[in-house]
Structure formats: structure tokens, C-alpha cells
Image: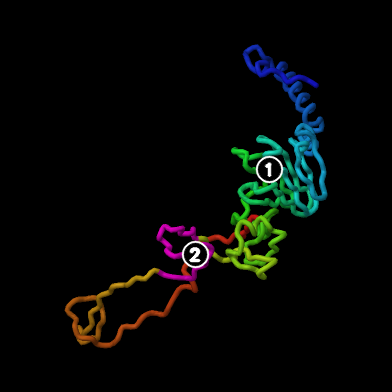
Amino acid sequence: MTALPAASTFTGSGVTEGDFKTRLTAMRAFLAGLLGADGTQATALTALGALMNGSIAKTTSHTVVAADRGKLIDCSGTWTLAIDPVATLGAGFAFGMRNGGTGSITLNPDLSEQINGVSTLVIGPGESCVVLTNADATGWLAVFVGGGGGSTGQVAGFAMNTAPVGWLKANGAAVSRTTYASLFTAIGTTFGVGDGSTTFNLPDMRGEFVRAWDDGRGVDSGRVFGSAQGHQMQSHTHALSMYAGTEGGVDDVKREPGLTTVVGTVTTSAAGGGSENRPRNIALLACIKY
């Protein structure tokens, strides 16, 4: 394979335009040897998979073992990808996985170990990640690439009217405790018990503003986590001094001292405004990561 040109051959007053082009040609040849000569992303990814100790395709349940160190595991279907304990695989162990199908792959570390802070992590269709031991070698960290990611239970707004891969609409729906096991572990029945056995409810964010949980601060005292609040306007008064009487033979009600005799009545104008108090806003689709 062509050697990578030294950095010094690209710089300096003695490097001519022809020399520079020659070095660029040599650099391209070097990269082509690593990533494939056709310059396509697909070829480069395949080559990178080989550099990572190869790639394997899996369509049914598989357990990551020592021989999978550095491998790219290309998955399809709906099943569980188990991971041997950190103590067995060793600190610094890493592998890549890609969900190239339309189902969901559940990453399930062995024993009581966690991945990204939860017991299982669902990788949705089209998502890819690198999985490696965490800093203290007690569990696992999944780093998403290519647009995936988000922590299970995270709520976010999207500028499209359908939920992206790996997310569900936060619409209060009852969903399966098995299919969305990681999300059920994260939020439980905070937003509803579903049918009480096989399903649980998602938060219903439709048409709602989010208020950060008080968590003991005392600004929103007594607030239960995950609870909803209705409309409310803070208690207040309006002070208005009015004087009534007859001035110049004409009944008058106005803000002027000296008028002390009440004549006639004061009426209010018709109610105006809408059905709620609200600031300016924009409607986005609220979704929750599963």
C-alpha cells in the first residue's frame, strides 16, 4: 500500500505546486488503500468494519463475548443482544452495533450492570452506536452515531409531525411494558398504569407547557412529580378611586375629588380575550425516547 506522505512534504518554501499535487495524489492512494478506491460511504464503512476486527450479521439473539471485541455487529429483526459481564470482557472492551432492520434490538448487559444508566437499552431501526465499558468499568456506555441517541425517558420537541426513529409520540398512549421495557424501567407508571399488567401510559404532552419540577425548592410547593396543573391567575386586586355626584346640573361619575353624592351606577365593559392565559408560542411534536 502507498505510504502516507510526511507532513513536512506539504509545507516549506521549496514545495512547488507540482510537488503539492504529487503529495495529494499519494495521500488519496493511501486513503483508498484503507477505505476503498471508489470513494463511496458504503465501501468506507465496510472497510472500517474490517479494521474494527470485522463485522458479523445477526438476525436472532446473540451474546457479545470476548471474540467480539472491536467487531461491528450488523443486526436486523427484533431480539435481545446480551453482553457478557465487564469482569469477563475486561475494561476497555468495545464493539459497534448497527440496527439495519425495521425492528428493535434490546441491549441487555449481564448481571446487575447497566447501560447508559438503565438495565436495558433499545436500539431503534436505523440507529447505530459504539458500546464500551464506562469509566470505572462497572457498566456500559452506548455512544450513538449517525443521528441516533437520546437518553431513555427523555422528552423533546421535533419540527415534524411524526416521531423519529427510537422515539414515541408523548400522547398519553398505553404501550407494552415488554416491547418498551427500557422506557418502562425508566418512568414506570408515573403517567398511568395502562391496563395494570401488560401496558403503561406515556406522558401526554399535547397542548401543554412544561414546568420544571419544584423538587423541594418551595416555588411550586407540594407538587407531585409528573402531575398536571390547570389554568390559574395569581390572586391580586385593582385599586380605583371614583367620585360621583352632580356637576353643572349633569349627573357625573369620574375620578375627581369634590363629588360626594352618588348618582347613577358604574357599569363594566363586556368581557374580552380568549379561553386561556398564554404567552406567544410555537407548536412542535413532543416525543419521548424509548
Q: Earlier in the sequence, mark 1 or mark 2?
A: 1
Name the element at disc 2.
Answer: loop
Report which residue position mark 2 lands on. Answer: 224
Compared with 122, 272 (above or below) is below
> Is residue 202 shown to the viewer in this render?
yes
Picture quarter with the N terminus: top right
User: Does residue 287 appear left or right of residue 24 in this picture?
Assistant: left
Nearer-the-camera pick, 180 or 275: 180
Cα–Cα span, label 1 and label 2: 36 Å
Disc 2 residue type (three-letter): Val
Outermost residue toward the left? 258
User: Does residue 277 appear left or right of residue 255 in this picture?
Assistant: right
Q: Measuring 65% from the left and 16% from the top, which residue is drawn there?
A: 8
Magenta residues?
211-233
Q: Please state the horizontal and vertical placement of residue 215, each as a whole percent of the image.
A: 46, 58
Q: Write down the quadrant of residue 9 in the picture.
A: top right
Q: Please state the horizontal and vertical placement of residue 133, each as a whole percent of the image.
A: 65, 39
Q: Measuring 70% from the left and 66% from the top, which residue is drawn there?
A: 198
Q: Residues within 10 Å of mark 1 (few under 14, many from 20)?
A: few
Compared with 19, 205 (above or below) is below
Q: Nearer the viewer, mark 1 or mark 2?
A: 2
Q: Is residue 159 magenta?
A: no
Disc 1 residue type (three-letter): Val
Q: Measuring 31% from the left and 83% from the top, which residue is drawn there?
A: 266
Coloration mode: rainbow
Picture quarter with the C terminus: bottom right
Badge number at residue 145: 1
Badge number at residue 286: none
Q: Measuring 57% from the left and 66% from the top, which residue is drawn there?
A: 207
Name the element at disc 1.
Answer: strand
Nearer-the-camera pick, 26 or 193: 193
User: Does residue 155 appear left or right of residue 162 in this picture?
Assistant: left
